[in-house]
Image: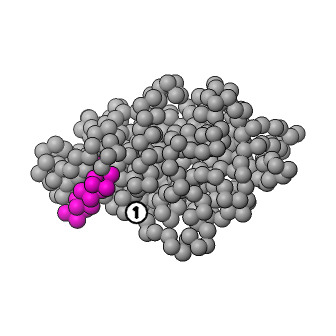
Amino acid sequence: MSIETEVLIIGGGIVGASAALFLRRRGLPVILLDMGACGARASGVNYGGVRRQGRPLAQMPLTARAHELWGQLPGLIGTDGEYVRSGHLKLARTEQDLDELRAYRERTEGWGMDLHILPADALRRRFAWLDPGLAGGSFCPEDGHANPRLVSPAFAQAAARAGADVREQQRVVQAVAEDRRFVVRTASGEEIRARFLLNCAGAWGADIAAAFGEPVPETAIHPLMMVTEPLPAFMDVSLGMQGGGIYARQVARGNCVIGGGRGALQSDGFARPSRKEVPALLARAAALLPPLRGAQVIRFWTGVEGSMPDHNPVLGPSSKLPGLFHAFGLSGAGFQIGPAVGEVLSQLVADGASSLPIDAFRIERYTAAAHAAESQSSREHTLE
């Protein structure tokens, strides 16, 4: 059976689901497909950091708009998703790291982050529960964290309430362009025809792009995370580290959520916590956060996320087919900007243009000529 719609979205994570929600608010018919449960993969198993600090300069307009949308979360999706603006503290191991944080503050001046540089003595006075050997940090007062297991599915649920046709457990087996329509076929035998196709397939986004003649060097990453038993409250900010390695936050129930390192891909196609990486993460956490010493870890987990060489997403129109739009490869940092990316996609479909500058994210940057001049990855990106 063939089904017709105006917009078809592949991928029900926070990007695809928010795009569906914003499109329905514009009155467009939408079908949203996900191979499993919406918001259950990268969007639902990530660390939960909702931060602007540490992002590449090209993402500043996106992250600023996303910050506004996160402030409207209950009105958007019907829940606050345990979102708190706790502040985000990026730590420096060395004086060189602290100098890089100072330089980043200068480069991002004017974007409303109000970054405060804390030398070592000020850091120890304000955050006495941290490793006293740190060189300092940079504090962003209005960044924070949320519960991805609540927020990400809630976007799909809100889209469904707004009239989107949300179809879970629908694995795409073919996507082609035929007769000025995009035709997508699923493993269950459905055929959906649409005027617009949004590729929000996360770590599988490159497969969809390649099917339309636009190969890109996306890789799959498997961030490693763990959560402790409930502990007395001590950590009142979300933490990251300049140069990466570890990130942490404590929720209202007292559990500490900690990430760093990678899981391991298994032969069955699923990623699991790595026996090699787990001890290293435990050691880093105990060294950075002395109150964790002796605490019980109740769960380790990992997921799968799409990553690009420059740590920026692929976002924007296809270079080959009108009506095809890409939004994938958010490189472990898509949770915060996800709603803004979804809004941009809705504008591209409904208005033919985005209100935010997105040229830096176009898929054309991975053509052969552009790829030869590809810039080095930013050390600012830390995956939390």
Mark 1, Cα crowd under 10 Å, few <14 / some 14-19 / many 20+, is some
Taking 214 as reference, is 241 left or right? left
Q: Considering the image in quadrants, where does the N terminus appear?
A: top right
The residue that appears at 35% across and 39% down in the rendered structure is: 144
- Decide if residue 159 is in sight here: no
Span highlighted in magenta in the image:
89-108
Q: Quadrant of residue 281?
A: bottom left
Taking 296 as reference, is 190 left or right? right
User: Is 26 or 153 nearer to us in this picture?
Assistant: 26
**Which kind of residue does numbered mark 1 sit on?**
Ser
- The residue beneath circle 1 is 378
The residue that appears at 48% across and 39% down in the rendered structure is: 148
Q: Is residue 10 rendered magenta in the image?
A: no
Taking 160 as reference, is 225 left or right? left
Above-or-below relation of 370 to 159: below
Above-or-below relation of 27 to 379: above
